[in-house]
Image (cartoon, grey):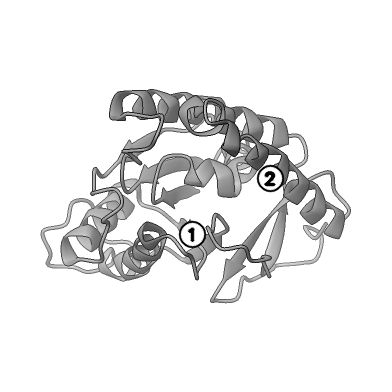
Amino acid sequence: MNIIVVGPHPDDQELGMGGTIARLAGQGHNVLLLDMTNGEPTPHGDPVTRAAEAAEAARILGVPRRGLDLPNRTLTYSLEARHLVAGAIREHQAHIVFTPNMPDAHPDHTATTRIVEDARFDAKLTKTELPGEPIYPRWLIYYYCTHLRTIPQPSFLLDISGFADRKRDAILAYKSQFVTPKRNRWIIQWLEAGNRYFGSRIHTEAAEPFSTAEPLGLTGLECLT
C-alpha cells in the first residue's frame, strides 16, 4: 500500500507517529515522508544541518522523504501549496495520507492540515496540469504532534511494540532540536511515557494515537488488539 505522511517540518512525523512509520515500512508498505518546509530557522539549527538530520531520521525508520520547500513559520493556505501536495499524492499514488490533528497552536500545523485536506480532493481531478495520474486517497488519517497542552482523544490506537526504540532513535537524529538544546531533552521522556500509556489502553507495550473523520471499515475482529 502506498502511504504519505505529511509533516509541517522535518521531525513532526517522527514525533507524532515514528513507531507507526517504522512498523508500516517493516510490513512492506511504500511509505513516503513529505515535509512542507525545511523547519528552519531554529535556535541551534541551519538548513544544511536540518536536512542531514532529516535524512538520517528517515534512514533509521527505513523510508524515503522529500520536501516541498514552502516557507517555514509563514506557511499559508494557497492554491499553489494545495497543488504541490496534490502532485506529490498523485506521483506517489497514495492510498492513505496522514496529516497533523487539529486544533494546534502552531500556524504552520494548522495551514498544513487544511492544505492536505483540500489537496486530497485536488489529487483526483482530471484535465489539470498536475503531475501523475489522478487518485483519491481512500483514507485521510490524523496523527498527534500538537503544540497545545491537550490530551488526545483518538479514534484508534496502533500498536508499536518493538518499534518504540527506532522512534526514539529517529527523533534523537535531530540533535539540533532535541539534544543540543537542554530544555528540549525532556520531550523524549514525555513521548515515551505517552507511548506506554496508549499501549496500556490496548494491553500492548506501546502504541500511538490517531483520529479519523470518516469511519474505518473492518472485515473482521481478528485484527483487534
The CA distance from mark 1 to mark 2 is 16 Å
Residue 164: image location, x then y, percent: 71, 37
Which residue occupies 59% across, 31% down?
182
Q: Residues within 10 Å of mark 2 (few under 14, many from 20)?
A: some
The amino acid beneath tag 2 is Leu
Q: Is residue 202 visible?
A: no
Which residue occupies 31% across, 70% down?
118
Residue labelled with disc 2? 191
Query: Looking at the rendered structure, which numbered label has been put on residue 100?
Result: 1
Q: Is residue 53 visible?
A: yes
Residue 179: image location, x then y, percent: 56, 27
Instruction: Count all numbered tags in the image, as a single digit.
Output: 2
* Disc 1 versus disc 2: nearer the observer: 2
Tell me if 66 is positioned left or right of 203 in this view. left
Q: Up-down: is 44 above or below 11?
A: above
| Quadrant containing the C terminus in the rendered view | bottom right
Q: Up-down: is 123 above or below 199?
A: below
**Front in this rendered view, residue 173 or 123:** 173
Which residue occupies 20% across, 66% down?
78
Residue 125: image location, x then y, percent: 22, 69
Tell me if 34 is positioned left or right of 211 in this view. left
Element class at badge 1: strand
The amino acid beneath tag 1 is Pro
N-terminal-most mark, 1 or 2: 1
